[in-house]
């Protein structure tokens, strides 16, 4: 495991650091990596939601890494795909989930991307709204 910055080097993209890369029509023959996760967050307007696997297991997000260049450190971008039916209620895309049993298949290229980068089925996630920070309406002493 290494520490890496989330987002591409903005020097090569008109000053914008991209944090995601679409999976459609792409192959990832090298620089594959994984981001360990127990949840991911989604936004819908001002509301924010926590998404976990329904069975409580942790998972990985498929990603690609880029080497350090100049002052920009080693970095990564998360691979995205169409959201599953649950997440689709909030946003159109989500990070590609790699289950623990698929880790080496992603890293050592033994399984084609098309078999691993698939939209998860319905009813795999638990989605819970994250309460906004409480607003203090009065000062009590």
Image (spheres, grey):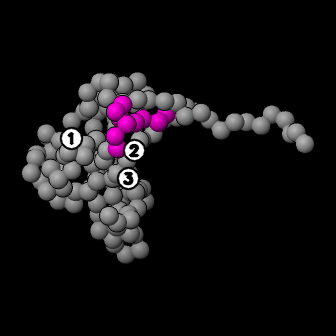
The residue where tag 1 is placed is: 117
Please identify the residue farthest to the right as the structure is shown. Answer: 141
- Mark 1–mark 2 distance (CA, rounded to whole Å): 19 Å
Q: Quadrant of residue 70?
A: bottom left
**Mark 2, secondary structure of its residue:** loop
Q: Which residues are magenta?
A: 49-58
Q: Answer whether residue 76 is visible to the viewer in this image.
A: yes
Residue found at x 15% / y 50%: 105
Q: Which numbered disc, 1 or 3, marks the residue that appears first in the sequence?
A: 3
Q: Is residue 73 within the magenta segment?
A: no
Q: Which residue is under mark 2?
A: 38
Figure check: 55 above or below 78: above
Which residue in the structure is indicated by mark 3? 18
> In this rendering, which labeled residue sits more in front, label 1 or label 2?
2
User: Which residue is at a point 59% across and 33% down the rendered structure image?
Assistant: 131
Disc 2 versus disc 3: distance between alpha carbons? 23 Å
Q: Residues within 10 Å of mark 2 (few under 14, many from 20)?
A: few
Left or right: 140, with 32 as reference point: right
Mark 1 element type: loop
């Amino acid at each position: 495991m290494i520490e890496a910055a989330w987002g591409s080097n903005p020097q090569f993209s008109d000053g914008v650091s991209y944090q995601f890369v679409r999976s459609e029509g792409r192959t990832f023959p090298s620089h594959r990596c994984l981001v360990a996760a127990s949840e991911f967050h989604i936004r819908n307007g001002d509301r924010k939601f926590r998404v976990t696997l329904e069975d409580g297991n942790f998972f990985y997000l498929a990603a690609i890494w880029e080497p350090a260049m100049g002052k920009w450190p080693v970095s990564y971008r998360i691979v995205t795909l169409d959201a599953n039916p649950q997440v689709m209620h909030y946003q159109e895309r989500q990070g590609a989930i790699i289950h623990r049993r698929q880790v080496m298949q992603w890293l050592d290229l033994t399984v084609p991307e098309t078999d691993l980068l698939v939209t998860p089925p319905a009813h795999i996630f638990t989605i819970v709204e994250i309460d906004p920070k409480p607003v203090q309406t009065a000062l009590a002493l």
